Image (cartoon, rainbow, N blue to C red):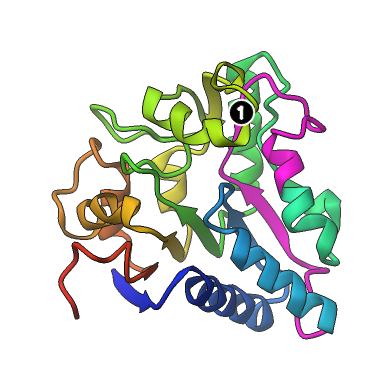
Amino acid sequence: MRIVRTRDYDDMSRKAANVISAKIILKPESVLGLATGSTPIGTYRQLAEWNKKGDLDFSQVSTYNLDEYRGLSHDDPQSYHYFMKTNLFDLVNIDIAHTHVPDGSNPDADAACREYDEMVAEAGYPDLQLLGIGHNGHIGFNEPSEYFSKGTHCVDLTESTIKANSRLFEHEKDVPRQAYTMGVQTIMFARSILILASGVDKAQAVYDMCYGHVTPQCPASILQLHPNCTVIADEAALSLCPAE
């Protein structure tokens, strides 16, 4: 794993945007795996700014998001469909037909997950997969478990994840208890992985990911085995890690 230490959240966001923009410039038809949550918002804003200036072209890019809450319609303000449109897709010149998010509105979990796996496989898997990391080491919605997951599947969210996500909902009881998520194996099929972390509250998870045992109890730890994984994190998130 390559670890890039940054000053703060804004520095992290700019450096991550530089990595993603370089990928698009070198391969305009790039397949990008995208993440949601608060961590990548600054990166998306920077990419949108460069697109607006004409420095970056999304017209040939296709995207596949990691996850979606089960039971939310695409236009629900709390859905990840809505998040991506608001924070990136509506701000750049991407063809919306080339953007993909698991169909949380489909009540048939098996069908929704199977169809998404087929789409991601048909696309040849991401050239670059963007990730954040949860406080408990989850990536996507792959929670700590007894084994590493494979394909897209329906997951019961842990109480810690529900609590962490409750800031985005009016009441904690409104947070969905299930989600559809790419599996760890699918994530590992990406040709390159870029994982972001910011804040001292992520420090233990980042340490476990980079220096702990590879274990499904910390799903992100498997990234130690990926041949092309870059961690971009600020000083606070790396505060438990040795300086290199």
Instruction: Please say whether residue 243 is visible from this viewpoint.
Output: yes
Start and end of the magenta stretch?
Answer: 54-83
Would residue 231 be visible to someone looking at this image? no
State the image quarter where residue 108 is shown.
top right
Point out the image quarter for the N terminus. bottom left
Q: Dot 1 lies on which element? A: strand
- Residue placed furthest toward the front: 170
Q: Is residue 80 magenta?
A: yes
Residue 131: x percent and y percent?
48, 54
Q: Measured from the top left, where is residue 121 in percent x and y?
A: 58, 46
Residue name at image x 62 percent, y 22 percent: 70
Q: Which percent across, then down, holds residue 242?
A: 15, 71
In this figure, which residue is indicated by the disc labeled 1? 69
In the rendered image, the quadrant that contains the C terminus is bottom left
Quarter of the rendering containing residue 174: top right
Q: Residue at x 23, y 35 (%)?
A: 217
Lateral position of residue 69 relative to residue 178, left or right: right
Residue 113 is left or right of residue 213, and the answer is right
Left or right placement of residue 10 versus residue 85 in this view:
left
What residue is shown at x 48% (from left), y 57% (from top)?
Answer: 190
Mark 1, residues whose alpha carbon is within 10 Å: few (<14), some, or many (≥20)?
many
Q: Please tell me which residue lies in front, 235 or 193.
A: 235
Residue 103 falls left or right of residue 89? left
The residue type indicated by label 1 comes to Tyr
Kindly identify the residue that appears in the image at 31 percent across and 73 percent down.
3
Residue 38: within the magenta?
no
**Compared to 236, does 17 lie above or below?**
below
Q: Identify the main secondary structure in magenta.
A: loop
